[in-house]
């Protein structure tokens, strides 16, 4: 059963996912299917926080503190990004 995504969730980055900084963007590559994903500077910061295996609530708190974003909008955007990353096999969602 697929875990339900929420702010209490944590994600891990599978071993078959590579990532590299290219100028102001982070490029993420899923090796099994060759899926490529580019992240802007805020997405890159989120990726860095996800690598620390923090809860999504902790990631949201950090993003709200570091950037001028409302909590509700930040939560919506964060959950959307993590959902898309999960659908592409770039992260694994855990409860």
Image: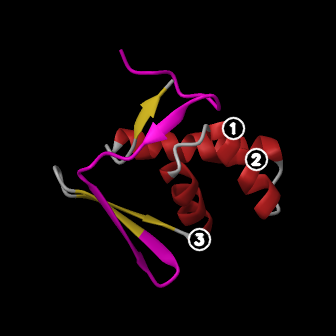
Q: Residues within 10 Å of mark 2 (few under 14, many from 20)?
A: some
> Residue at left 59%, top 39%?
79
Looking at the rendered image, the disc whose residue lies closer to the viewer, 1 or 3, is 1
Residue ID for mark 3? 41
> Residue at left 82%, top 62%?
68
> What span is colored magenta in the figure?
1-26
Q: Residues within 10 Å of mark 1 (few under 14, many from 20)?
A: some
Quick one: SS at disc 1?
A: helix
Please tell me the numbered disc located at residue 61: 2
- For the N terminus, the image quarter is top left
Choose top left, top right, bottom left or bottom right for residue 38.
bottom left
Q: Position of residue 91 (x, y in %)?
A: 39, 43
> Residue at left 69%, top 38%?
57
Residue ID for mark 1? 57
Q: CA distance from mark 2 to mark 1?
A: 6 Å
Most distant residue in the left direction: 32
Quick one: SS at disc 3?
A: helix
Is residue 15 part of the magenta span, yes or no? Answer: yes
Contact, mark 2 vs mark 1 (Cβ under 8 Å): yes
Q: CA distance from mark 2 to mark 3?
A: 17 Å
Q: Residues within 10 Å of mark 3 (few under 14, many from 20)?
A: few
**First in residue order: circle 2 vs circle 3:** 3
């Amino acid at each position: 059963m697929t875990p339900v995504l929420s702010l209490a969730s944590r994600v891990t980055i599978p071993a078959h996912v590579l990532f590299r900084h290219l100028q102001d963007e982070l490029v993420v590559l899923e090796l099994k299917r060759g899926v490529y994903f580019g992240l802007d500077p805020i997405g890159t910061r989120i990726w860095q926080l996800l690598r620390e295996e923090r809860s999504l609530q902790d990631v949201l708190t950090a993003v709200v503190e570091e950037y001028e974003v409302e909590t509700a909008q930040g939560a919506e955007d964060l959950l959307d990004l993590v959902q898309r990353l999960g659908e592409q096999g770039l992260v694994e969602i855990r409860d």
